């Protein structure tokens, strides 16, 4: 029995425009499921529908096999962490954590027991008598987490819980949430607009755009075989380099400026010759020795990240980025030699945006399975 | 080197000090110039009259308010020995006791139900707030009709359900209550609007979070709504409280202090002393006593409130 199942679920606030359309989704027990998409794509709406805070316009929502479309939130046995934490400002940390148990009339002794365990786990023991405004952002975040942990609900929903934190704390909390989820065996539905967060935390990711599912899959799958142009450009940072392309006489012409030789056996699934868009990940625009270069491009911007270097080139009307490991002392305006392989290109249909051919070879080192 | 550097540094330090002092002076001047209008207005319309009242309260006056004999605190003594004033004091406290909780409870109830997200709720909100736009005089006339012993709706209603008619404004048992009822009605508009504003500023996330936690309606009301509303409630209570002490208009319109001085509230008493009996000295003394009462009770209220009120 699946903890959460959505069958053809749709949502409309005003009866004319659909905010979510035909969402089919099954979430497995103990899974860390990430909902990712740009702002306004309907992530919060979907999460709030699962929580019971928003009505369901069409379709069916099942929790543990039972249809729960009309069940109020309190009977759905789940917990939720809000983006702004929704801590009660007039209550102490302790009262905040115990609010739900108190409401459900859990016995005093058990309340104390659970409070103690949770506070210990979240490192809140010394803060129990503070009010939320006396806490730092990270501590508030932990109180919000504690509130959902203490409820012992098997399903936990989180709506952009880290978006108010600074980058360092966010990275830290990512690990902590992930560890907590594994430790408690929670089924987690986690909303974020940050694809890095999605990639690093999710067992599976669902990419949402304009209320429709773009792709569901494991992080690596989304990265290597993006189902369409949207996913291709959304997942990965810096984003995939894209360009319009045509194929003629065993030659791939990109943005009418780059020409690469190709043999048809490299791309068995590409039948059409025009209306193509090709994409290549920044790490696949590699440095080549001058005599072995496939192409030369002029650097128009360079960013030093310390352990890697980002180079920007102009390709037709597009800006392409290359990611090279290490520190490269290159000046803007220099022309650099690059090696590219047809095997690293993804091919998309320009009109539908759908993937025609995924890269046949994904990493310099192939995906390693242990 | 040192000898050269030292005086140079000193000059610099002196200069700096002079500069900061000058800036401070400019700042103070600016601050006062912004304050000046309100200080002026307050002095003219508040501090001067207050001082003048205190001064008057120590004298006997002639009918045009000119001081005649200095009597010191005798006015105050006489007041506290006067049975009419003591009665007036009692009525005032009773009146405050009726109207403040009455207005607060009714408008809190109305505000809570008007805060629900329902269709056409705007209509009810406007209705409930509408008494704010009605002048005391107009409202009093309206209530005069309702209270009318024979053709008033209230007595007609009693007649229908078979209860003997009540002399709402003429029966000493009822008069104060009747005036209190009409006052509550008149105050509701304002308190309702302020409380509704307070309710709407409570973050709805808190309720959603409580919903998921499994909290029921009354649990949410007790643990979230009331504590979060407490600053607003406190404000409203203080204002209604002070207003109740200062009630005048409806008394003058509805009962003129009668029957048997039952509704002879303090401000009405002051009015009568000053403008009917031309005893400006005694009237001033009463006004000062009322002022001290309100001041002390408000201070007590703040002291008690501080502990219960949750400010964001
Ligand atoms: N209460 C509402 N009434 C009407 N439209 C709404 C309501 N809430 C959201 N919407 C609309 O639904 C769409 C999806 O909103 P939603 O809040 O789910 O986006 P989101 O993916 O969570 O975005 P973000 O990353 O900015 O939080 C938006 O176009 C928004 O305007
Ligand atoms: Mg959102």
Image: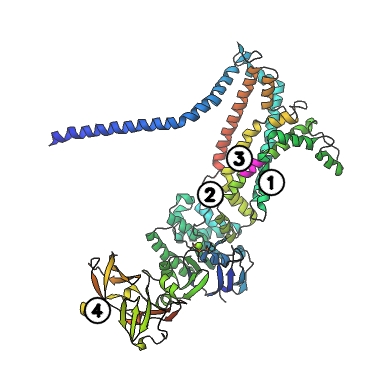
Whether residue B109 appears in this view of the structure is no
Q: CA distance from mark 1 to mark 4?
A: 80 Å
Q: Residues within 10 Å of mark 1 (few under 14, many from 20)?
A: few
The chain identifier of the residue carrying mark 3 reads B
Return the x and y of residue B6 as percentages of the image width and height. Answer: 17, 34
Do tag 2 and tag 4 residues touch (Cβ < 8 Å)?
A: no
The chain identifier of the residue carrying mark 4 reads A
Q: CA distance from mark 3 to mark 4?
A: 79 Å
Q: CA distance from mark 3 to mark 1?
A: 19 Å
Of marks 3 and 2, the one in the foreground? 3
Which span is picked out in magenta? Answer: B187-193
A45 lies left or right of B13:
right
Q: CA distance from mark 1 to mark 2?
A: 32 Å
Under circle 3, the secondary element is helix
Do tag 1 and tag 2 residues touch (Cβ < 8 Å)?
A: no
| Nearer-N-terminus badge (2/4) | 2
Q: Which mark is residue A90?
A: 2
Of marks 1 and 2, the one in the foreground? 1
- Both marks 3 and 4 on one chain: no
Under circle 2, the secondary element is loop
Of marks 3 and 1, the one in the foreground? 1
The residue lying at 36 percent from left, 83 percent from top is: A247
The residue lying at 49 percent from left, 28 percent from top is: B39
Q: Main secondary structure of the magenta part?
A: helix
């Amino acid at each position: 029995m699946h903890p959460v199942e959505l069958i053809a679920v749709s949502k409309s606030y005003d009866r004319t425009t659909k905010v979510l359309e035909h969402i089919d989704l099954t979430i497995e027990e103990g899974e860390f499921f990430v909902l990712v998409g740009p702002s306004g794509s309907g992530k919060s709406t979907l999460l709030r529908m699962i929580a019971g805070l928003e009505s369901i316009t069409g379709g069916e929502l099942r929790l543990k096999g039972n249809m729960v479309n009309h069940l109020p939130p309190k009977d759905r046995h789940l917990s939720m962490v809000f983006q702004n934490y929704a801590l009660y400002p007039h209550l102490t940390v302790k009262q905040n954590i115990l609010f739900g148990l108190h409401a459900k009339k859990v016995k005093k002794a058990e309340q104390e027991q659970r409070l103690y365990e949770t506070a210990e786990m979240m490192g809140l023991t010394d803060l129990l008598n503070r009010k939320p405004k006396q806490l730092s952002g990270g501590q508030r975040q932990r109180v919000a987490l504690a509130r959902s942990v203490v409820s012992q609900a098997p399903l936990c929903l989180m709506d952009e819980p880290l978006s108010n934190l600074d980058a360092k704390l966010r990275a830290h909390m990512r690990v902590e949430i992930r560890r907590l989820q594994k430790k408690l065996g929670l089924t987690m539905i986690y909303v974020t607009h940050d694809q890095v967060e999605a990639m690093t935390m999710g067992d599976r990711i669902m990419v949402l755009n304009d209320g429709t599912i773009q792709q569901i899959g494991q992080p690596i799958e989304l990265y290597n075989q993006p189902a369409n142009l949207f996913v291709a450009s959304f997942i990965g940072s810096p984003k995939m380099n894209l360009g319009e392309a045509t194929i003629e006489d065993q030659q791939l012409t990109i943005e009418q400026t780059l020409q690469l030789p190709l043999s048809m056996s490299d791309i068995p699934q590409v039948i059409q010759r025009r209306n193509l868009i090709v994409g290549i990940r920044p790490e696949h625009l590699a440095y080549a020795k001058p005599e072995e270069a496939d192409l030369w491009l002029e650097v128009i911007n360079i960013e030093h990240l310390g352990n890697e270097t980002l180079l920007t080139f102009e390709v037709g009307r597009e800006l392409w980025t290359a990611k090279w490991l290490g520190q490269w002392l290159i000046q803007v305006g220099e022309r650099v030699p690059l090696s590219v392989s047809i095997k690293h290109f993804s091919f998309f249909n320009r009109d539908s945006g759908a993937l025609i051919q995924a890269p046949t070879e994904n990493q310099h080192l192939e995906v390693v399975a242990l | 080197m040192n000898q050269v550097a030292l005086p140079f540094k000193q000059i610099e330090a002196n200069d700096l000090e002079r500069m900061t002092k000058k800036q401070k002076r400019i700042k103070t001047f600016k601050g006062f110039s912004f304050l000046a209008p309100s200080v002026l207005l307050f002095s003219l319309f508040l501090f001067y009259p207050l001082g003048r009242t205190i001064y008057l309260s120590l004298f006997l006056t002639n009918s045009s308010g000119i001081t005649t004999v200095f009597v010191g605190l005798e006015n105050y003594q006489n007041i506290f020995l006067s049975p009419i004033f003591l009665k007036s004091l009692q009525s005032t406290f009773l009146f405050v006791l009726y109207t403040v909780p009455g207005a607060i409870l009714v408008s809190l109830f109305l505000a809570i139900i008007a805060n629900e997200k329902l269709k056409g709720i705007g209509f009810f909100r406007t209705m409930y707030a509408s008494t704010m736009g009605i002048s005391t005089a107009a409202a009093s006339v309206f209530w005069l009709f309702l209270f009318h012993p024979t053709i008033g709706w209230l007595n007609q209603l009693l007649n229908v359900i078979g209860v003997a008619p009540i002399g709402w404004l003429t029966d000493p048992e009822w008069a104060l209550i009747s005036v209190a009822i009409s006052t509550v009605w008149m105050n509701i508009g304002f308190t309702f609007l302020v409380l509704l504003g307070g309710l709407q500023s409570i973050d709805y996330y808190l309720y959603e979070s409580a919903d998921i936690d499994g909290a029921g309606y009354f649990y949410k009301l007790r643990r979230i709504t009331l504590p979060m509303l407490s600053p607003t409630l406190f404000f409203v209570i203080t204002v209604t409280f002070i207003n109740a002490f200062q009630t005048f208009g409806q008394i003058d319109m509805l009962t003129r202090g009668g029957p048997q001085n039952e509704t002879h509230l303090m401000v009405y008493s002051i009015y009568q002393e000053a403008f009917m009996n031309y005893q400006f000295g005694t009237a001033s003394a009463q006004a000062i006593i009322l002022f001290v009462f309100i001041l002390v009770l408000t201070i007590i209220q703040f002291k008690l409130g501080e502990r219960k009120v949750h400010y964001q």
